[in-house]
Image: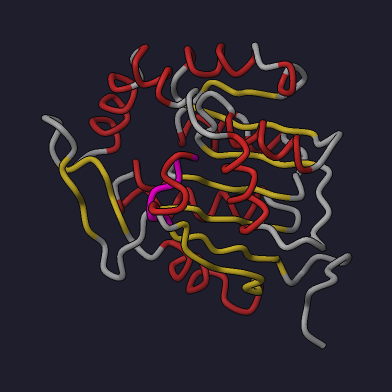
């Protein structure tokens, strides 16, 4: 399965109904999920999301971290246009690009945010392209990396509607750890059980929070 095919499929799926579905989740429950994923002692001044869509995750983070500088990119311009109408994201840097366009044309000139994260973004990438995304996540982050994705111990693909195998699963946190080893520390990991979090849009997703060990202001590193 090619990146070109899957990216075009996800653009096609981002129709009005899909935008509406992503606007109707339980925000209070979503904030509970984010409090679960981010330890209470973490302080953030900036965050960047790969595949930010309508910006709902960035919106949640602004509720938890007042004054947070938010940014992200997405392949679907209509979703970004909707995100820009959210008052909490009115000053956000929302970039219209696919993964490789972002890496080549935008990422090198961006300031490094405290937190860089994905939420069901890697699941939309063929396995051959997820390595480029993981490398980019590591390079862009100044301190924290959060991966929130559907998980499989072995790389697999799942059929979605009539489009074939366009949902990809893997142990993305382990892959990132294999890439960067001692340069990363695992701060927190867990599971967003759909039984509890379906109404927030987090249905059986694994998450892992990393801190880069080469940051001068690291407060979680082991002595």
Residue 20: image quadrant is: top left
Residue 124: image quadrant is: top left
Is 168 included in the stretch rendered in magenta? no
Is 202 included in the stretch rendered in magenta? yes
Q: Nearer the viewer, residue 26 or 103?
A: 26
Task: Look at the picture and state if 109 lies above or below 89.
Answer: below
Image location (x, y in percent) of residue 169: 30, 55
Image location (x, y in percent) of residue 96: 53, 20
| Left or right, 45 with reference to 167 | right
Q: Which residues are magenta?
A: 200-205
Task: Look at the picture and state if 6 lies above or below 11.
Answer: below
The residue at the point 38 percent across, 65 percent down is 171
| Left or right, 20 with reference to 40 | left
The residue at the point 56 percent across, 29 percent down is 73
Image location (x, y in percent) of residue 53: 50, 27
| Left or right, 91 with reference to 145 | right
The residue at the point 60 percent across, 19 percent down is 83
């Amino acid at each position: 399965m090619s990146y070109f095919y899957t990216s075009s499929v996800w653009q096609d799926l981002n129709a009005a109904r899909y935008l509406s579905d992503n606007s109707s989740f339980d925000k209070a429950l979503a904030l509970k999920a984010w409090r679960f994923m981010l330890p209470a002692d973490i302080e953030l001044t900036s965050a960047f999301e790969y595949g930010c869509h309508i910006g709902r995750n960035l919106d949640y983070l602004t509720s938890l971290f007042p004054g947070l500088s938010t940014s992200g990119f997405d392949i679907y311009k209509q979703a970004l246009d909707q995100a820009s109408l959210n008052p909490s994201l009115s000053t956000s840097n929302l970039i219209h690009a696919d993964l490789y366009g972002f890496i080549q044309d935008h990422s090198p000139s961006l300031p490094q945010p405290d937190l860089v994260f994905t939420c069901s973004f890697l699941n939309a990438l063929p396995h051959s392209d997820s390595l480029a995304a993981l490398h980019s996540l590591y390079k862009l982050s100044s301190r924290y990396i959060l991966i929130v994705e559907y998980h499989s111990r072995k790389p697999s693909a799942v059929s979605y509607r009539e489009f074939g195998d366009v949902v990809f699963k893997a142990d993305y946190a382990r892959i990132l750890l294999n890439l960067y080893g001692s340069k990363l520390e695992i701060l927190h990991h867990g599971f967003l059980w759909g039984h509890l979090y379906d109404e927030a849009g987090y249905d059986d997703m694994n998450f892992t929070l990393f801190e880069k060990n080469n940051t001068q202001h690291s407060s979680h590193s082991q002595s």
